[in-house]
């Protein structure tokens, strides 16, 4: 505590040295003039603001000082506020937050504080208003500020992406009571709950996602637009993480939420910026920087109907010094399984069967930065997560054994970036990252009569990724609307995957892929604040081009064009067009090919007692990259006349071709579903039977009778293939309104996404519906609620709505699913007392204890609800306490 007090005293002394020790604080405005700000010691307050989202930092100053601070989302988007520590007037706090952001503030006649671009403030001529200012950087800092602001969706420093961006800051995450990033992303209407998520149960693989729709690692994967977890790129501080399992998903849940400053989601194609996988979009998790202090916390939760009792303990520490800083987080979580017997609508299922797994998870994260010279800074991020699961899936009670799986997974990432400031405002960056993911699947069979266990499967799905990159960014020329900037870069990646059978010590699957890339991105502002006129306040063109060369399938080039147009200050229009791609997963290419002989009834057919179906499964070495053409257009409205209100309407269209899929996902209906007809030969010849067997690496006879080619009634080709087309279109709408009440501040916000997607497995096939059908994204998802804050008290409530989905077997549509969440948090004031720095939280998910909509499952081992869209948890109560020093 003495060291912490001394460090805080030194930081205050440095600040006092920078702003002066007289009754006037000296600041520097955007045009370089020194200006005096009244100190007004009688109104000084103690501010303790960590670096973070500028919008959230301004809100915090407004709430503490009682000032109504207003700004438009466009003005503060993707900007960061600096750390503010010490006792000062609110004007000084705002000035420090705005330093280096190109923004100033002004005080309106009614006491409102307006945040606006520095150019707009400099042109203002109303004399009674004070001169806009931005604080002088404290003395002793480096001459060159290398603390770059990460803008997801563009490589241009301080740039703006023409794509829509969803930003979920740490304060919003706390307001809504989310315990991990998995809960955060599943609350976003543009994200589908299928893919790799802990609540996805048996039967979900019959959806269009196939094998991707299952709980494999126990983690949580982004799945924007429902295109699959492999079609959304996930980044940590802008760096790629290793794939998990065999589905090319990335576990965003491995990142401790306590260290997260914000998560940016760009639900638009971004391959021209980031390369493969960014078809549905990109998610970038930004870690906190310059964290100062220590926090320890505990959280306990459980479902009121039983199951998922969870105990969570966290510790976060960090400090800063003149030339650097770090943050470190440790997290330990354990939760009990949710068994089918604990819900009335699944009590008929064999016991034990789990709806949610039991999970033991431990995570460690370290993020540090250090200025090596006045113009060189090194940043390092390190993450490791261990996770063990306990599950009882697939059990029917009709066999002498039941199954228990205990997967063990580890995910790790080490990445570093060296930033060098060059002359002329150019920056050179050299980055590298190494990630590993190990998933060991351990499946046992337990004898129902005796309980004796035998190991059936123990194999590792092992992924490794190495990437390196050299980037440069800086101004190119002076355009009519301001400075045109360019970003260029080169780099490479290597991905490895192998499936290792630990029982036989044999590698069943092994594959490696290398790629090299080069990119260029440019922004040209044709009109800006200095050239603004009626109907043309801002006009900016953006363009990006990326070329990649893969050693497997060759070269691919992806362009992207965008425009940002603001006719008036109250609205902004964005539009983008681009090409995106996704390289086939190594598992899809190299998985062992197997032939299987089964009774015709196993595939929904009818026939004699000896009638069989011969099937071919596995990888396909001839796969080509998936390609997409993406369009997006958005209109953001942020009227100055209605301070605190902002909304955005987005239209999107994705034409996704050559998709790599398992052409048959619902094997129980394979012979009767017309969508599968082109992959089934119902009149096999001896030659075609022999050719299928010759293409297989192994043959399994599951028919219970000797193999006879004459008994084969159909051939089923279920290898991975590039299908013809998937089309995804829809509309997003979001809005928020922040206003003051007699006591505190109220924020009302909501978002909805309407989705229409179809798929055709050949050019001649009629497209069939994907969105709105069982185990695929619902057509409508929405979340609406309000947050009230007053001093240290924050209360929120949100309504979640998921539309019903259709069971294509019967043409019946399930009812929709609407739930209510509530959260209350109370933080004591900082001080020296034992009760200072405490924060208490209580949250309730699914307050009304809604059960999921039901359907009739085809087999008794499947729960009677769509686990990709609806939850069986019911009402979940959570209580937490955190102590800050």
Image (cartoon, rainbow, N blue to C red):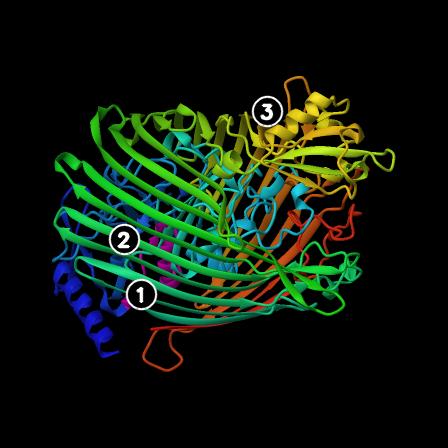
Q: Compare marks 1 and 3 and give the one earlier in the sequence.
A: 1
Q: Is residue 495 left or right of residue 702?
A: left
The x, y position of residue 149, in whole percent, is 29, 45
What is the number of the mark on residue 380?
A: 2
Which residue is at the front of the view, 314 or 509?
A: 509
The x, y position of residue 618, in whole percent, is 59, 36
Q: Label 2 vs label 1: CA separation?
A: 25 Å
In the rendered structure, which segment of residues is drawn in magenta?
A: 43-66
Near mark 2 (Cα within 10 A), the count class, few <14, some 14-19 or many ≥20, is some
Q: Is residue 221 left or right of residue 341?
A: left
CB within 8 Å, label 2 to label 1: no
Q: Label 1 vs label 3: CA separation?
A: 53 Å
Residue 492 found in image quarter: top left
Which residue is at the front of the view, 609 or 157?
A: 609
Q: Compare marks 3 and 2 and give the one earlier in the sequence.
A: 2
Determine whether 115 is above or below 64 in the image. above
Quarter of the rendering occupied by the C terminus: bottom left
Residue wearing tag 1: 48
Residue wearing tag 3: 725
Asked if one can make out residue 31 in the rendered structure from this viewpoint, the answer is yes
């Amino acid at each position: 505590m003495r060291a912490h007090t001394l460090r805080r005293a030194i930081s205050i002394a440095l600040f006092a040295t920078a702003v002066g020790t007289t009754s006037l604080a000296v600041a520097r405005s955007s045009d370089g003039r020194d200006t005096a700000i009244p100190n007004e010691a009688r109104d000084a307050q103690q501010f303790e603001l960590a670096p973070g989202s500028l919008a959230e930092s301004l809100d915090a100053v407004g709430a503490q000082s009682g000032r109504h601070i207003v700004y438009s989302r466009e003005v503060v988007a993707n900007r960061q506020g600096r750390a503010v520590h010490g006792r000062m007037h609110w004007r000084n706090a705002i000035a420090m937050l705005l330093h280096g952001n190109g923004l100033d503030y002004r005080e309106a006649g009614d006491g409102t504080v307006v945040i606006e671009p520095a150019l707009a403030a400099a042109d203002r001529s109303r004399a009674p208003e004070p001169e806009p200012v931005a604080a002088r950087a404290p003395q002793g800092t480096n001459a060159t500020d290398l603390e770059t602001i990460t803008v997801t969706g563009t490589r241009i420093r301080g740039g703006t992406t023409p794509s829509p961006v969803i930003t979920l800051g740490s304060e919003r995450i706390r307001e809504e009571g989310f315990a991990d990033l998995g809960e955060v992303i599943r609350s976003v209407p543009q994200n589908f709950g299928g893919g790799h998520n802990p609540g996805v149960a048996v039967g979900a693989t019959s959806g269009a996602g196939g094998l991707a729709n299952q709980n494999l690692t126990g983690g949580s994967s982004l799945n924007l637009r429902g295109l699959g977890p492999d079609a959304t790129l996930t980044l940590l501080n802008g760096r790629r993480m290793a794939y998990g399992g065999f589905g090319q998903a990335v576990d965003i849940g491995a990142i401790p939420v306590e260290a997260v400053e914000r998560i940016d989601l760009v639900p638009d194609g971004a391959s021209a910026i980031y390369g493969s996988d960014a078809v549905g979009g990109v998610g970038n998790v930004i870690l906190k920087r310059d964290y100062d202090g220590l926090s320890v916390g505990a959280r306990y939760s459980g479902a009121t109907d039983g199951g998922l009792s969870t105990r969570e303990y966290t510790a976060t520490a960090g400090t800063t010094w003149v030339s650097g800083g770090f943050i470190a987080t440790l997290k330990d979580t354990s939760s009990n399984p949710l068994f089918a017997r604990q819900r009335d609508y699944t009590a008929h299922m064999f016991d034990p069967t789990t709806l949610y797994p039991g999970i033991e998870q431990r995570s460690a994260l370290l993020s540090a930065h250090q200025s090596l010279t006045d113009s060189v800074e090194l940043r390092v991020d390190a993450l490791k997560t261990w996770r063990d699961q306990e599950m009882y899936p697939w059990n029917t009670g009709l066999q002498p054994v039941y199954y228990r799986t205990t997967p063990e997974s580890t995910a790790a990432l080490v990445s570093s970036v060296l930033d060098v400031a060059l002359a002329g405002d150019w920056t050179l960056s050299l980055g590298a990252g190494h990630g590993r993911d190990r998933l060991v699947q351990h499946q046992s069979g337990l004898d129902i009569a005796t309980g004796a266990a035998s190991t059936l499967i123990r194999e590792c799905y092992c992924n490794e990724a190495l990437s390196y990159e050299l980037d440069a960014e800086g101004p190119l020329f002076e355009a009519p609307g301001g400075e045109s900037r360019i970003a260029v870069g080169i780099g490479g990646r290597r991905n490895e995957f192998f499936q290792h059978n630990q029982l036989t010590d044999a590698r069943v699957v092994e594959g490696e892929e290398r790629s090299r890339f080069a990119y260029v991105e440019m922004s040209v502002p044709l009109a800006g604040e200095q050239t603004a006129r009626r109907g043309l306040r801002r006009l900016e063109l953006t363009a990006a081009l990326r070329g990649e060369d893969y050693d497997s399938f060759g070269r691919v080039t992806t362009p992207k064009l965008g425009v940002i147009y603001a006719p008036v200050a109250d609205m902004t229009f964005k539009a983008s067009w681009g090409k995106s791609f996704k390289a086939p997963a190594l598992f899809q290419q190299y998985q062992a090919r197997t032939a299987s002989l089964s009774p015709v009834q196993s595939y929904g057919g009818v026939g004699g007692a000896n009638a069989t179906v011969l099937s071919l499964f596995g990888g396909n070495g001839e796969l080509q990259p998936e390609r997409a053409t993406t369009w997006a257009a958005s209109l953001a409205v942020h009227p100055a006349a209605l301070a605190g209100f902002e909304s955005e309407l987005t239209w999107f269209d994705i034409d996704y071709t050559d998709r790599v899929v398992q052409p048959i996902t619902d094997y129980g209906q394979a012979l009767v579903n017309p969508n599968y007809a082109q992959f089934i030969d119902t009149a096999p010849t001896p030659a075609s039977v022999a050719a299928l067997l010759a293409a297989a690496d192994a043959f399994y006879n599951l028919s219970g009778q000797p193999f006879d080619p004459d008994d084969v009634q159909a051939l089923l080709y279920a290898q991975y293939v590039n299908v013809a087309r998937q089309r995804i279109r829809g509309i997003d709408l979001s809005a928020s309104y922040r206003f003051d009440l007699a006591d505190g501040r109220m924020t009302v916000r909501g978002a909805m996404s309407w989705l229409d997607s179809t798929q055709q497995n050949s050019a001649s096939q009629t497209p069939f519906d994907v969105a709105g059908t069982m185990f695929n994204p619902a057509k409508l998802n929405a979340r609406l609620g309000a947050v009230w804050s007053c001093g240290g008290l924050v209360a929120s409530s949100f309504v979640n709505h998921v539309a019903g989905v259709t069971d294509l077997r019967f043409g019946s549509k399930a009812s929709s699913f609407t739930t209510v969440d509530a959260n209350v948090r109370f933080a004591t004031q900082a001080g020296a007392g034992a009760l200072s720095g405490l924060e208490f939280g209580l949250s309730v998910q699914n307050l009304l204890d809604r059960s999921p909509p039901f359907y009739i499952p085809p087999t008794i081992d499947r729960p009677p609800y769509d686990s990709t869209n609806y939850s069986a948890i019911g009402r979940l109560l959570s209580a937490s306490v955190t102590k800050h020093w």
